[in-house]
Image: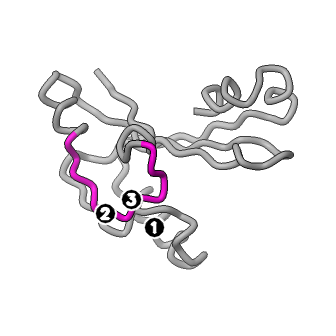
Amino acid sequence: MVAMVAKRAVFGNSLMSTRRPTFLHERELLLAGYTAIVGVDEAGTGAFAGPIVAGAVILPLTSRLVELDDSKKKTSAARECLYERLLECATSWAVGEASVAEIHTLGLRAANYLAM
């Protein structure tokens, strides 16, 4: 079984949390029998125009990427370095997109789920 944990679920409703992650939700899912946890984040839902893009990654349960944080807090160079590290250690990863036409047809929330 695979569980998807969106950023809101992990940090409550505080998207810009400065708390260190406790991994409480992840531990509960593992105890419930899940074997992988997918981290998901999106970009673009605040914009009036343009697509919604979402990224998903499964990291080994033993991985400790302490620099994994909100991309808006990172420099371009730091994001590139982190991207390379994610590709090296990810078990699996994917990127999804909902186009402007899909946003207009489905609505913002449904298009967000489509991208994820």
* Image location (x, y in percent) of residue 65: 31, 63
Label 2 environment density (alpha carbons within 10 Å; few <14, some 14–19, many ≥20): few
Query: Which residue sits at x=37%, y=65%?
Result: 18
Residue behind mark 1: 82
Q: Residue flagged by tag 2: what amino acid is it?
A: Leu
Q: Secondary structure at mark 3?
A: helix
In the displayed structure, does residue 116 sit left or right of residue 69? Answer: right
Query: In this view of the protein, which residue sits in the foreground, 86 or 66?
Result: 66
Residue behind mark 3: 88
Label 1 environment density (alpha carbons within 10 Å; few <14, some 14–19, many ≥20): some
Gap between marks 1 and 3 measured at Cα: 10 Å
Q: Residue flagged by tag 3: what amino acid is it?
A: Glu
Q: Quadrant of residue 113?
A: top right
In the displayed structure, does residue 60 sit left or right of residue 83? Answer: left
Is 23 colored magenta in this rendering?
Answer: yes
Q: Is residue 68 above or below residue 39?
A: below
